[in-house]
Amino acid sequence: MWKLNQFIPDDDGEREESLLEEESDGICSLSPTQSLIVFAKPIKFALLFTFGNVLAVGSTAFLIGPERQLGMMFDPVRIYATVIYIGCVVLALIFALLIHSKILTVFAIIFEICALIWYGLSYIPFARRMVSSLMIRLCDTEL
């Protein structure tokens, strides 16, 4: 893009900087503490992450209506994924707010992320079956 800007005459003689031309210190400008906040402050991360997940589910309920959202969540196809996801959300909040255990909170966050992925895959036809067969092929120890 900057080559094109060389051929386009400017009235001011000054070339505007784009986001791509700005100098940066690296790809990620986060500090190590900021990038590893899950391990540095897992309780704070668990609260914010869980609150974000609840807002995401709530936003879809706002868009399609709470009755239809609950009907879709507790559909026989995804009832287990929903119950496991809600259980992981509750566990993450219990470990973060009541028990104040950092290691249990980290494990609850990991389980919550896995449950969220599995819950999200339940809305895509044949996605859970495809991911299950892929994981079996990847983790198969038979040679």
Image (spheres, rainbow, N blue to C red):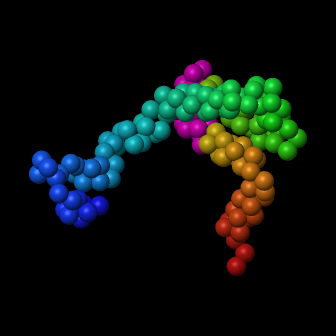
The reply to whether residue 7 is visible in this rendering is yes
Image point (39%, 43%), residue name: 35
The reply to whether residue 111 is visible in this rendering is no
How many labels were placed on the picture?
A: 0
Q: Is residue 101 magenta?
A: yes
Q: In this view, does 7 lie to the left or right of 105?
A: left
Residue 20 at what x, y percent from top left? 29, 53
Q: In this view, does 13 lie to the left or right of 1?
A: left
Residue 103 at what x, y percent from top left? 54, 36
Q: What is the magenta segment's predominant secondary structure?
A: helix
Image point (60%, 20%), residue name: 98
Residue 21 quadrant: bottom left
Per the rendered image, the range of residues in magenta is 96-110
Q: Is residue 63 left or right of residue 41?
A: right
| Residue projecting furthest to the bottom | 143
Q: Is residue 40 magenta?
A: no
In this rendered view, identify the residue nearer to me: 33 or 69.
Answer: 69
Q: Is residue 47 above or below residue 40?
A: above
Image point (11%, 51%), residue name: 13
For the C terminus, which image quadrant? bottom right
